[in-house]
Amino acid sequence: MSGTTAIRTATLLTLTALAGGCQATGEETAAPAGATAATPSASAVATGTPGATAVPSPVTAANTATVCAEVDKLIIAGSRKIADDSAAATRRKLTPEQVNGQLKGNLSALADDVRGQAARARDPEIKALLTDTADRIDAGARSATPVKWLSSTFVDIPRRLTAECHA
C-alpha cells in the first residue's frame, strides 16, 4: 500500500468511526444519584399496558454517564487528530514509515487517555470495558500495520462503547 493510499485509508476509517460510533442512543439518561428507577404501576402490569413488562434500567455508578461521555469525547478528539494528521501527512509527503509512526503515537496517547477514564470509573463493568478498550487501542499502537488495524478493530470500538458504556 502506498503512503498516500495508507493515509487516505486511515482518514476514511477514522471519519467512519466518528460518524458511526460515539453517537448518543437516547438510552443513556440515568436517574440522579440517590434516585430510584421508576417501576411500572400495579394497574399497568395488571392491564398489560404496552411497556409495562419492560425491565427498568439497572442502577449504575454515579459517574458512569460522565465517564462514558468523556471517553466519547476522547475517541472523537483522537479520531479527528488522526484524520487531521493523515491529511497533513499527505501534504507533507511523509513516507509510509513516518505515517505509521505518527499514527502509533496518536493511538498510544488515546489509549493512555482512555485508561485514565477507566481509573475514574466506579462501576467495575465500565472500568473493565474501558481498560479493555485502552488495551485494544494500545494493540493498534504496537501493530506493524496500524492503518490495517484501524479498519479491522478501531472502527468497532465506538460502536461497542455506545452499546456497552451507555447501556
Image (cartoon, helix red, strand yellow):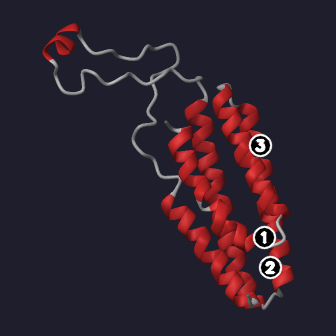
Amino acid type, mark 3? Arg
Label 2 – label 3 distance at C-alpha: 24 Å
Label 3 – label 1 distance at C-alpha: 18 Å
Examine the rendered structure and indicate whether residue 62 appears above or below residue 138: above
Q: Quadrant of residue 153?
A: bottom right
Helix, strand or loop at label 1? It is helix
* Residue drawn at the location 64% of the way across and 79% of the way down: 9
Q: Residue 167 at what x, y percent from top left? A: 49, 36
* Residue drawn at the location 85% of the way across and 80% of the way down: 98
| Mark 3 surroundings: few (<14), some (14-19) or many (≥20) residues within 10 A | many
Q: Residue 101 at what x, y percent from top left? A: 86, 73
96 on left or right of 10: right
Q: Are marks 1 and 2 in contact (CB under 8 Å)?
A: yes
| Mark 1 surroundings: few (<14), some (14-19) or many (≥20) residues within 10 A | many
Please report whichever mark, 3 or 1, sits nearer to the chain's N-terminal start: 1
Helix, strand or loop at label 3? It is helix
* Residue drawn at the location 59% of the way across and 40% of the way down: 68
Examine the rendered structure and indicate whether residue 75 appears above or below residue 2: above
Please report whichever mark, 2 or 3, sits nearer to the chain's N-terminal start: 2
Which label is found at residue 103? 1
86 on left or right of 108: left
Which label is found at residue 99? 2
User: Residue at label 3?
Assistant: 115
Q: Residue 38 at what x, y percent from top left? A: 35, 16
